[in-house]
């Protein structure tokens, strides 16, 4: 399959250039001509061909052109044309990176075959480059949408730790994007070309966790008919992502601690110790320190995992990010389902931005996709919203408290609310009580409780 069909033919023989152009255009390619290497180099940057066919013997030789092309970030594939007596020079060109060579006098059937093979190779290279670019964009830190202060702080820490071979513990509620952040850390690390292996510790039966992590040998237990590598071994040289690490049984925690301390594993049923070169990134929505107090999580493992702890904020603390997230996720959903002509009404966007999203980004993504595939018109309206989102009152977004990480006094908050309400009502207790949606008697009681009656 031919993708970009552009070819640049470089030869100082004008008649041969024209014949090659005719033959290649008959084969379905778009051909541009150049008479020497200098002209060719300018045309390469102007037309961006996938393939360059160049004669070796020109005022600016094919070898010189090739050296200049090799310095480009994305060089085209090069085929050398040479006289039969200068095959040695063509071999030198191959060593410098030319894909293939053809000899004069040209066999145009052979030339077309070589060109076709070179194009298939270049198409594959372009596809790989495109996929890698898409992967970098999706899993790079720029792929995590948002400008909330708490999120930006986490992304800054993650981008700095990505370059270091340090164990990372990502904490956050379900659906906040812990795996996305883990992939971004891997994708921006020196291990990016090596495997990123995920294991969800909470989705595997407890009796199978160790075999999944460490692997097993043939005959290690009933049903073990062959030996099998574990996730840690499969991640060798790369990153092991332990999702929901708080669900690991205590026995497996002991063995994982050994991996982190000594970089060694032993398969179930084997006494042989194997080195494991892996970087561990763990994630959990659980409070591991509370689990330590309850005896459900090892304290020594916690400190091994939490060398760099990262706390992803929930979506309800990223209110300003919601409009951009809605637009981004809805666009992704439309692309995924190949639906281009459906839009969200302004009223729907308002409802989405004032909902608290207990399921965080994952819940938002699911709601948008559900509305898209179920809507019966080109405009998604309030009727299409799930009931729990539609019934959020319009003024619920007018009041928002940013909770400090170190905790907060409920009584202090209540006192401050009463003071603010009285200030807004210019001391009128009836209006202040109405504003707070309480009775005047209740307001007076609370004013006395906090010593506000005298004030």
Image (spheres, helix red, strand yellow):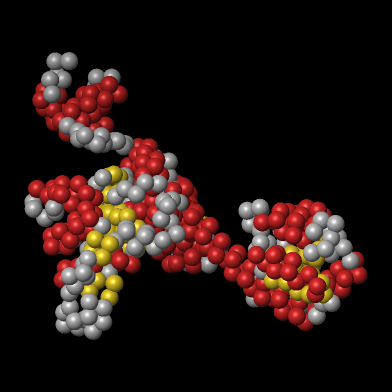
Residue placed furthest toward the right: 15
Work out whether residue 301 or residue 182 is closer to the camera in this orientation and state it.
Answer: 301
Q: Tell me where residue 52 appears, x and y as whole percent.
A: 74, 64
Q: Is residue 38 left or right of residue 196?
A: right
**Residue depicted at x 22% and y 55%:** 262
Determine the image quadrant of residue 319: top left
**Residue depicted at x 88% and y 71%:** 16
Q: Is residue 123 above or below residue 169?
A: below
Q: In this view, does 90 lie to the left or right of 239?
A: right
Determine the image quadrant of residue 202: bottom left
Q: In this view, does 160 lie to the left or right of 450?
A: right
**Residue depicted at x 39% and y 42%:** 160
Q: Tell me where residue 174 appears, x and y as whole percent.
A: 28, 55
Q: Is residue 314 among what the camera can see?
A: no
Work out whether residue 163 or residue 318 is closer to the camera in this orientation and state it.
Answer: 163
Work out whether residue 252 or residue 110 is closer to the camera in this orientation and state it.
Answer: 110
Q: In this view, does 292 lie above or below 278?
A: above
Task: Locate the C terminus and report the quarter of the image it occupies.
Answer: top left
Q: In this view, does 278 lie above or below 393?
A: below
Task: Locate the N terminus and report the quarter of the image it occupies.
Answer: bottom right
Q: Is residue 37 among what the camera can see?
A: yes
């Amino acid at each position: 399959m031919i993708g970009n069909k552009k070819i640049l033919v470089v030869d100082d023989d004008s008649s041969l250039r024209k014949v090659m152009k005719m033959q290649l255009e008959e084969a379905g390619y778009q051909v541009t001509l150049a008479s020497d290497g200098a002209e060719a180099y300018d045309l390469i940057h102007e037309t961006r061909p996938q393939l360059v066919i160049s004669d070796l013997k020109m005022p600016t030789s094919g070898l010189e052109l090739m050296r200049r092309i090799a310095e480009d970030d994305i060089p085209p594939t090069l085929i050398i044309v040479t006289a039969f007596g200068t095959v040695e020079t063509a071999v030198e060109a191959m060593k410098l990176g030319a894909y293939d060579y053809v000899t004069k006098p040209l066999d145009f059937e052979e030339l077309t075959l070589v060109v076709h093979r070179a194009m298939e190779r270049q198409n594959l290279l372009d596809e790989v480059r495109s996929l890698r670019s898409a992967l970098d964009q999706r899993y790079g830190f720029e792929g995590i949408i948002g400008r909330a202060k708490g999120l930006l702080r986490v992304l800054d820490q993650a981008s700095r730790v990505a370059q270091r071979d340090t164990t990372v513990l990502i904490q956050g509620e379900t659906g906040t994007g812990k795996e996305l952040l883990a992939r971004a850390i891997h994708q921006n690390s020196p291990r990016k070309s090596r495997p990123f292996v995920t294991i969800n510790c909470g989705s595997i039966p407890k009796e199978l966790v160790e075999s999944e992590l460490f692997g097993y040998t043939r005959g290690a237990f009933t049903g073990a008919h062959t030996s099998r590598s574990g996730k840690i071994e499969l991640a060798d040289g790369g990153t092991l992502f332990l999702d929901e690490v708080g669900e690991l049984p205590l026995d497996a925690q002991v063995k994982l601690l050994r991996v982190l301390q000594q970089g060694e594993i032993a398969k179930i049923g084997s006494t042989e110790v194997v080195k494991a070169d892996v970087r561990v990134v763990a994630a959990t929505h659980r409070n591991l320190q509370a689990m330590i107090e309850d005896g459900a999580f090892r304290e020594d493992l916690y400190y091994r995992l939490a060398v760099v702890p990262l706390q992803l904020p929930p979506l309800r603390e990223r209110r300003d990010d919601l409009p951009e997230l809605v637009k981004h996720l809805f666009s992704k959903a439309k692309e995924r389902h190949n639906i281009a002509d459906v839009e969200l009404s302004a009223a729907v966007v308002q409802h989405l931005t004032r909902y608290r999203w207990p399921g965080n980004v994952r819940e938002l993504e699911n709601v948008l996709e559900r509305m898209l595939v179920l809507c019966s018109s080109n405009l998604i309206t309030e009727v299409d919203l799930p009931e729990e989102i539609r019934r959020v009152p319009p003024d619920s977004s007018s009041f928002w408290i940013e909770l400090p990480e170190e905790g907060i006094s409920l009584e202090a908050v209540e006192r401050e609310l009463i003071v603010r309400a009285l200030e807004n009502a210019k001391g009128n207790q009836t209006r202040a009580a109405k504003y707070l949606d309480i009775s005047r008697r209740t307001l007076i009681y609370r004013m006395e409780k906090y010593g506000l009656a005298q004030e």
